[in-house]
Image: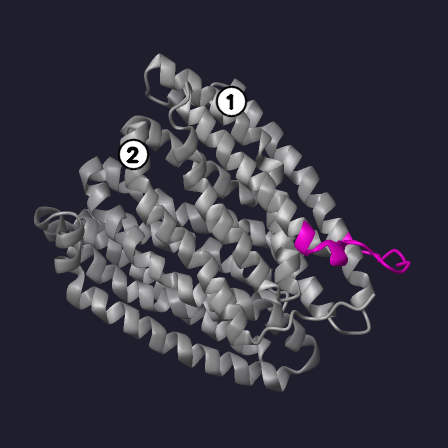
């Protein structure tokens, strides 16, 4: 079997990847006010938990989706292309088993009383309890979908991935809007979202059918599972720690200052960090390309890495400077002048960290392409300790401005460390 890269230039792949990430945000921007009006703030808050739960559930694939992207990309169009179906099918089996394990863990958590911590009326609480059960059953769809996407990324099929992401982005909000008038709107909305996940998995399977179906006999490859889990295990460490550093700061702010302060911090944070979509899209396209070049043409890898680094630098400067200059009038127009007075200084401090966060995407991808997920995981462990100590200190000294400064400082340290570590991968 000979698998060829999809016939798209790197620019074409980046375009489709950005489109697939950006359009769902536009859809969300339009649909969210309508959903809040139709469902009410309490139920929409519960629906936000559903999105968070299904989004974070990707951790249950233990990094296998990222690992299979690398392994497939290294074999595309080469003498070992016949091995791709074995890697792809093995990754899907792992994703299924880990997804089922994640489902069981969520069910155990439900029956251990974790939902009792949620403050809501009895009617909404019971509705969310049924909804949580549905989310637990959907975990295998999340893990399998992540691996299917990783397989397609490995062959450069970013246009097909964009199709599925755009469909998902539309269905995630159009589906709930269509069923919001039913007796249990939260459960019905979640069922629509889960059905969209099922349809997305079916579409990804269709697009990757020729890769999943072996056309020649393939001998057993020793260490296939071991190799995936070795790489994916370290990825899981990062996938657990990085979101923790992203979201726990809000709980710290709420406990040390107030819940209102969280709004002044989280709103500009969510607004500013969306700008990382572009460098993240570039890095995710280049990751499988780096994996291929790392094994075949290191000189070309160096040239592409340096050119992409320069491009991302100018992109992030172009994004960060307007945030610093126009944060207050933009937030005042979007929300209110009073809100902007408290939130704009946070956005301006976060903009400095945004610059380095965007630039860090490329060395991060290069290290993973060089099979050094262990390095990034260990770096995140060290960063977590430094960051939370800095967060507590600066939060007490400067309030939410201090929290923003701690985040920006972490982004600077993260970029400098990744840049230094990535130099070894280019030798």
- Let me know if residue 70 appears in the view: yes
Viewer-proximal residue among 252 and 10: 10
Where is residue 135? Give x, y as percent: 52, 31
Q: Nearer the viewer, residue 256 or 166?
A: 166
User: To which quarter of the image does residue 347 belong?
Assistant: bottom left
Q: Is residue 394 toward the left or the right of residue 168 in the image?
A: left
Q: Nearer the viewer, residue 122 or 391?
A: 122
User: Which badge, 1 or 2, comes first in the chain's sequence?
Assistant: 2
Q: Is residue 326 left or right of residue 376?
A: left
Give residue 36's mark.
2
Q: Which residues are magenta?
A: 206-226
268 in the magenta segment: no
To which residue does mark 1 refer?
110
Question: Magenta stretch: residue 214 in it?
Answer: yes
Q: Residue at x 78, y 57 (%)?
A: 85
Q: Residues under labels 1 and 2: Cα distance? A: 26 Å
Quadrant (top left/top right/bottom left/bottom right) for the N terminus: bottom right
Residue at 34% across / 49% down in the picture?
A: 388
Is there CB contact under 8 Å for labels 1 and 2? no
Which residue is pictured at 64% across the width and 73% down the height?
7
């Amino acid at each position: 079997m000979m698998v060829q890269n999809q016939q798209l230039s790197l620019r074409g792949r980046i375009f489709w990847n950005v489109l697939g990430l950006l359009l769902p945000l536009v859809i969300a921007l339009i649909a969210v006010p309508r959903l809040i009006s139709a469902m009410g703030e309490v139920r929409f808050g519960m629906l936000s938990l559903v999105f968070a739960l299904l989004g974070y559930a990707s951790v249950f694939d233990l990094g296998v989706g990222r690992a299979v992207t690398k392994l497939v990309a290294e074999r595309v169009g080469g003498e070992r292309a016949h091995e791709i179906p074995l890697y792809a099918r093995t990754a899907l089996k792992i994703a299924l088993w880990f997804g089922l394990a994640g489902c069981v863990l969520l069910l155990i958590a439900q029956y251990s009383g974790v939902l009792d911590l949620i403050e809501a009326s009895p009617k909404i609480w019971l509705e969310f309890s049924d909804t949580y059960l549905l989310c637990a059953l959907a975990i295998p769809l999340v893990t399998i979908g992540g691996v299917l996407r990783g397989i397609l990324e490995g062959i450069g099929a970013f246009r097909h991935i964009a199709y599925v992401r755009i469909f998902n982005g539309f269905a995630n909000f159009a589906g709930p809007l269509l069923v919001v008038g039913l007796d249990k709107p939260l459960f019905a909305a979640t069922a629509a979202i889960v059905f969209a996940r099922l349809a997305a998995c079916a579409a990804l399977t269709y697009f990757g059918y020729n890769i999943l179906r072996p056309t020649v006999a393939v001998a057993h490859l020793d260490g296939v599972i071991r190799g995936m889990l070795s790489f994916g295990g370290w990825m899981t460490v990062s996938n657990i720690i990085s979101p923790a550093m992203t979201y726990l700061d809000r709980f710290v702010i709420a406990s040390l200052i107030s819940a209102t302060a969280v709004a002044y911090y989280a709103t500009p944070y969510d607004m500013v960090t969306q700008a990382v979509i572009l460098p993240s899209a570039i890095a995710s396209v280049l990751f499988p390309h780096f994996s291929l070049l790392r094994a075949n043409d290191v000189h070309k890898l160096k040239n592409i890495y340096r050119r992409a680094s320069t491009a991302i630098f100018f992109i992030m400067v172009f994004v960060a400077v307007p945030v610093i200059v126009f944060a207050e009038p933009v937030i005042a127009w979007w929300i209110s002048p009073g809100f902007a007075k408290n939130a704009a200084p946070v956005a301006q401090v976060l903009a400095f960290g945004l610059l380095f966060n965007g630039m860090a995407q490329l060395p991060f991808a290069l290290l993973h392409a060089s099979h050094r997920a262990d390095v990034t995981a260990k770096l995140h462990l060290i960063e977590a300790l430094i960051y939370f100590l800095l967060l507590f200190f600066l939060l007490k000294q400067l309030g939410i401005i201090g929290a923003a400064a701690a985040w920006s400082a972490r982004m600077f340290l993260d970029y400098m460390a990744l840049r230094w570590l990535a130099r070894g991968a280019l030798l």
